[in-house]
Image (cartoon, rainbow, N blue to C red):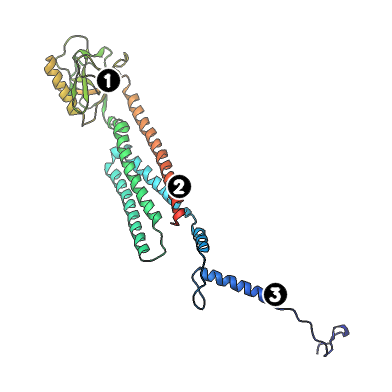
Amino acid sequence: WLKLSPSSQTSASETPKRRNPLPQFSALLYLGATFTMHGMQYGAAPYGSAPAVSEAHKTQMLHKKRRINIVGVCGSLFMVWMLFCIVYAVRSFSIRYTNPMLSWTIVACAGLVVLMCLGLTIDSFRRKRSGNNYEPMWYLFLFLTTLLALVLAMLMGDWNYYTNTSMYYSMSHMNDYSYVDPARMRGQQVMDAGSVFFVNTSTLDTRISLGFRNDGVYCVTPITTGDAPLASYDFWAVGMNCCSGSPGDFRCGQYDNTNAHAGLRMMRDQQRPFYRLAVQQAEATFNIKADHPLFFTWVQDPQAELNAGLADGWSWYMIGMLGHFLLQLFLVICASIAYGKFGAY
């Protein structure tokens, strides 16, 4: 039914020319062999045992599988660092003073994170013992570093708070008094004092200074005006390990500053009893009275001292943040190198 042109007609005796199928068949064999090798590589062994694989090939495939888990590395670096920064902050600054329950709650949440990492570590080791191809090393590393971060943050936060910032927050809720004359006023009149500005004629009477020795030398000397003896020596400049304990030797605070006529209240409860013993020793030695002694650090500007303490607290916090980040980065790099050699990804 289809009419062909004379040039396209072929006689019955002529045999059409056929293509050689060998190249196509060879290509199929190559693809099949490649697919089979990949299947055996992942455990698919057709029709019986897989052919033996050389040790060099096994080593090559093992190293091929050891690729860095970027998510695990970043989590181990930044999650642990953030835990350290949060705990360090709540143990160093105002939240600890104004809301201690909330501070401890945040620390407890950080502890739960550490326990969660411990649970994941134990579960990963259990899976590995059951024969699964499961590597628990990153979980173990995460648990150890979170525990280390929590301990360091607690220790450094306590040190920073008691050394630098606690005085600032304590004094913010106390009163300031000006033109206080030690010869006219008594300690009962300024029991809530945080900062006291004495009259310009006030000085340190180092003639009746003494020191009480315990775990250190607790030094005391009275704040007076003029040379006349007082009915009651209620205002005392104090310091620790800044005197020899003998009368006339007192080098605490800004003792050599002629412009210093102010006192910053000493608020450390653990030190107050020893300063009280030093005053009692001075009472017995010099036959004087101190009915209600108050203890101060002798300074020129109390508010500047408080601000300097808070600034030091923030400086140490930034140093701690940077130091822990570098420490954690170093540990992550070491763990990545070590796990890369042992195939623990």
The x and y percentages for residue 122 are: 33, 58
Looking at the image, the residue that sits furthest to the right is 6
Can residue 198 be seen in this snapshot?
Answer: yes
Residue under label 3, please give it.
23
Asked which quadrant contains residue 168, the reply is top left
Above or below: residue 115 compared with residue 289: below
274 to 285, vertically: above or below = below
Q: Are marks 2 and 1 in contact (CB under 8 Å)?
A: no
3D distance between C-alphas at marks 3 and 1:
99 Å
> What amino acid does circle 3 point to?
Pro
123, 282: nearer the viewer: 123
User: What is the number of the mark on residue 260?
Assistant: none
Label whose residue precedes the other's in the sequence (3 or 2): 3
For image coordinates 50% across by 56% down, the residue present is: 67
Q: Residues within 10 Å of mark 3 (few under 14, many from 20)?
A: few
Pointer 2: what residue?
A: 333
Q: Secondary structure at mark 2?
A: helix
Observer-side mark, 2 or 1, equals 2
Residue 135 quadrant: bottom left
Q: Is residue 249 left or right of residue 157?
A: left
Distance Cα–Cα, label 2 vs label 1: 48 Å
Residue 252's label in the rendered image is 1
Q: Earlier in the sequence, mark 2 or mark 1?
A: 1
What residue sits 46% from the left and 50% below the top?
A: 337
**Front position among marks 3 and 2:** 3
At label 1, the amino acid type is: Cys
